[in-house]
Amino acid sequence: MKTDSYSALAPAKVNLFLHVGPVQANGRHKLDSLVMFAGEEAADRLDVMISDDLSMTITGPGMTNPDYIGPIHDNLVLRAARALQAETGTTKGAAFTLDKHLPIAAGIGGGSADAAAALRLLTDLWGTDPAAARKVAPELGGDVPVALQGHAALMQGEGERVRRAPGLPRVPALLVNPNLACPTGPIFRAYDEAGGGAAFREFGAVPPFERVWDLVHWLREQRNDLQAPAIAAVPEIAGVLDTLQALPDAQLTRMSGSGATCFALFETGDAARRAEAQLSAARPDWWIRATMLGDAV
């Protein structure tokens, strides 16, 4: 039944590995990354209702540094709405409320998740063709197409090619950010200046794995190419990774995206939750969430 208001979660995106090609003539990079999404424990929430124009209110603990979020008119949610208006020719408006919980500039695609949620919600609210949302997603950022699809997937090309990765288990994980921003642009520039990407190759597919342990064993052979330049820019990331590696039962630790969020993978949800309790007591100043990675909820 069609209504005049909708709501959706915008979950964190986690790059289980991230291989980055050399910089191209357009200044962007080819990527190859296995992406999974967190559960509701690590997600923003976006509400929208019909309106005569476009507007947005931002609430939540993620607004502790509103200056860093930047001007609301330039937020990816409103940029997504304007792009969908232009593509479809609709004159309808929307009033958004973004309840922000994900840290900013954190390598987990919070802004992209918000934009993807906006495209999904507006498709329902305005009654537009879902193909229009898929068409405008790549111009909004490399993480938006995979967030719009919402499935565990290989993200390739400049992010516009999304290849679903079926046959994977849901993975217990602990996500940790030291509440330090790590903006994407400078990390990619440092990667380029170091001559990164020369050995870049794309995977044809991700093998199916029944058990978490088998997937983790395979992931150990992969890497995040942006981890070293991110640590050089924000040395605290190395300390986060060391802390995660020392947790009982942690099977794999790595940085997500361009940082500074890092993750540890576990075989069971109970192990991840115990690690969350232990680390939250030791580091109350960090953003820490135990969750299950897989398809978006």
Image (spheres, grey):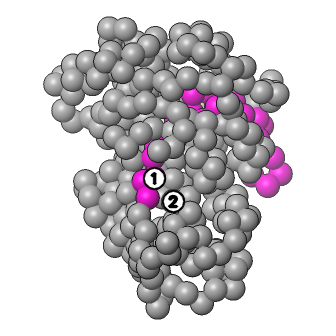
Secondary structure at numbered mark 1: strand
Q: Left or right of 201: which side holds 118? A: left
Residue 199 visible: yes
As shown in the figure, which amino acid type bears the numbered disc 1? Ala
Q: Would you place residue 26 above or below residue 235 in this image?
A: below
Instruction: Give how far across and how far down residue 268 sits, in percent.
Output: 39, 16
Which of pointers 2 and 1 lies earlier in the amino acid sequence?
A: 1
Going 51% across and 26% down the picture, which residue do you hit? 170
Going 42% across and 25% down the picture, which residue do you hit? 173
Is 116 one of the magenta-colored residues?
A: no
The magenta stretch is 8-35
Instruction: Give how far across and how far down residue 149 sits, in percent.
Output: 63, 50
Q: Left or right of 239: which side holds 116? A: right
Q: Which mark is residue 117?
A: 2
As shown in the figure, which amino acid type bears the numbered disc 2? Ala
Q: Which mark is residue 85?
A: none
Secondary structure at numbered mark 2: helix
Q: Quadrant of residue 127?
A: bottom right
| Residues tagged 2 and 1 counted as in contact (Cβ below 8 A) | yes
Which is the main secondary structure of the residues drawn in magenta?
A: strand
- The residue nearer to you, when weighing 291 against 107, is 291
Going 48% across and 31% down the picture, which residue do you hit? 293
Q: Residue furthest front?
A: 1
Q: Would you place residue 232 above or below residue 74 in this image?
A: above
Q: Quadrant of residue 207?
A: top right
Tell me the crowding category of disc 2: few under 14, some 14 to 19, or many 20 or more residues within 10 angstroms, Cα based.
Answer: many
Q: Residue furthest left?
A: 281
Instruction: Give how far across and how far down residue 144 sits, in percent.
Output: 61, 54
Instruction: Give how far across and how far down residue 234 sits, in percent.
Output: 43, 34
Q: Which mark is residue 10?
A: 1
Q: Would you place residue 162 above or below residue 116 in this image?
A: above
